[in-house]
Amino acid sequence: MRLKVATYNVNSIRSRLHIIIPWLEENQPDLLCMQETKVDDTKFPVKAFEDIGYKVVFHGTGRYNGVAIASKEELKDVRFGLFGRDPDRLVRGVYKGIHVINTYVPQGYKIDSPRYQYKLQWLRDLRRLFEEEYDPNWMILWCGDMNVAPEEIDVHNPKRLKNHVDFHIEARKAFKEILEWGFVDVFRKHHPNEPHQYTFYDYRVPKAIERKLGWRVDHILATKPLAEKSVDSYIDMKPRLAEKPSDHTILVAEFEL
DNA sequence: ATGGTAGTAAAACTA
């Protein structure tokens, strides 16, 4: 069985349907994990997904955050939140026997702010969720906007960005500790030591793509038994180059089970 | 150089 998975920080799902819907039709992934849907549940564009043959689960309250998963078959055992908090930042379920966790990790604002401490705690709690409710021998996918660039190769200027919340050593450490529980970075498995592979380019940076001023902060992680089955992973730049572009790109991984 | 743009929504907040 072929399994194609994608993750995309949409930065408002209603403002990105012109990208999302054609992309799903063309690429036909089994799963698309989305973050920053920025829409209240009552206004979620369910029909746009159903019209092209996708199911969708979602939770959001409007202005900030919001997560969703579109899938070809129904996602089972769907749950939201991390130990009762942030239901608009974590959604998980089971797809054809594979556990799927989609997260929008708090960004953290600045390293000296309480919000950064909250981000670090969030990542530690996420590790605890895996420890308590999952097993690294299971087939598990963890996808999302992690707001962490794990290694120097994942940012354009590691020296200048060392105090940025997405590259600060403490965030990288907290992220790495989740990987050490039992996850493989599927994109990096297929592109070892390949520089300038970024999933995010800030709108505010002029000519960011041409100047390669990006970040690799969106990830698809898989437990070892599942990562062994991955056959490809790549970054689709189309959303960043579209008419009304988004700041994030789409990250894809394919498995042959 | 501490700006810049884009999203929510109707002024400021988040990224």
Image (tube, rainbow, N blue to C red):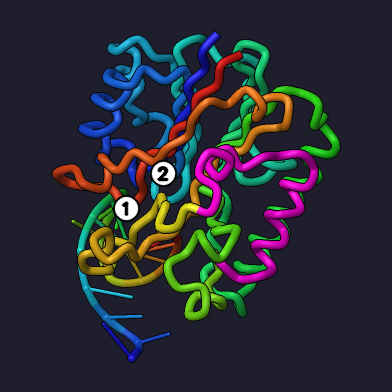
- Identity of the residue drawn at 76% across and 53% down: A177
| A180 falls in the magenta region | yes
Point out the image quarter for the C terminus of chain A: top right
Q: Can I make out residue A33 in this image?
A: no
Location of residue A143 by image quarter = top right
Where is residue A67 drawn, in percent x and y?
49, 37
Earlier sequence position, callout 2 versus callout 1? 2
Measuring 21% from the left and 68% from the top, which residue is drawn there? A206
Q: Residues within 10 Å of mark 2 (few under 14, many from 20)?
A: many
Q: From this viewpoint, is residue A214 visible?
A: yes
Q: Which residue is mark 2?
A: A9
Question: What numbered label is drawn on residue A247?
Answer: 1
Residue drawn 42% across the image and 37% down it: A234
**Magenta highlight range:** A167-193
Looking at the image, which is closer to me, A26 or A190? A190
Q: Nearer the viewer, residue A142 or B8?
A: A142
Give the answer, above or below, for where A129 lies relative to A23: below
Across and down, in percent, residue A219 comes to 53, 44
